[in-house]
Image: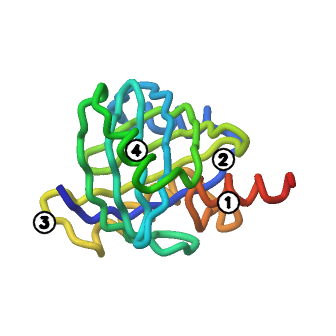
Amino acid sequence: MSFLNIEIKARTNNPDKIRKILQEHDAAFKGLDNQIDTYFNCKNGRLKLREGNVENHLIHYNRENKSGAKDSIVTLYRPNPDSSLKDVLINGLGILVVVEKAREIYFLNNVKFHIDSVEKLGSFIEIEAIDEAGDIGREKLTEQCGKYVTLFKIQNNDLIDCSYSDMLMEAVKREK
């Protein structure tokens, strides 16, 4: 299954404030997911296996690294968590980096929110406006993201232009 996704990612010093706003707007809480994202060496885009207690997916996506709203073309595969898929991917492609996080998942209609606590990186909010059926369109998705950036009072200097995997690899380089 492939779909268009518009995403905003930002640092947050106050996840409780974000959580409260989501609750005030009757966002559906889907759970706390302790996730391990294993990124594999990949020629085009990014390929990761997400292992969690709520979400388990093999995810391929192409997304430009830029601040603000980012288009992603996402392809999801829902493997059996007990399969040997991870071993096949490790043996065939090799591991690029592993990202561990605690993620609270919320939904308001087609917009998904993540309040993330990422090991070694800190706290973040992600806003994903999702067009699974192909009937919403890029303009409306971008507008939805902008609405929540304003609602959460996200500042431009808090916006993140890359993935957690990039940030973690950069942090590891600085440690060396």
Residue under the image location 17 percent in, 55 percent down: 1
Q: Residues within 10 Å of mark 3 (few under 14, many from 20)?
A: few
Q: Amino acid at mark 2?
A: Thr
Residue picked out by circle 3: 135
Q: Is residue 54 left or right of residue 119?
A: left
Residue picked out by circle 2: 12
Image x and y of residue 14, in percent: 67, 39
Residue under the image location 62 percent in, 36 percent down: 117
Contact (Cβ within 8 Å) of mark 1 with mark 3: no
Comparing 108 with 71, the one in front is: 71
Q: CA distance from mark 4 to mark 1?
A: 27 Å
> Mark 3 falls on what kind of element?
loop
Image x and y of residue 9, in percent: 54, 57
Comparing 55 with 127, the one in front is: 55
Q: Amino acid at mark 1?
A: Asp
Residue picked out by circle 1: 158
Name above or below for residue 71 compared with residue 30.
below
Q: Depth-wise, is mark 4 or mark 2 nearer the camera?
A: 4
Q: CA distance from mark 3 to mark 2?
A: 31 Å
First in sequence, mark 1 or 3: give its number. Answer: 3
Residue under the image location 70 percent in, 42 percent down: 122
Q: Amino acid at mark 3?
A: Asp
Q: Residues within 10 Å of mark 4 (few under 14, many from 20)?
A: many
Q: Is residue 84 left or right of residue 145?
A: left
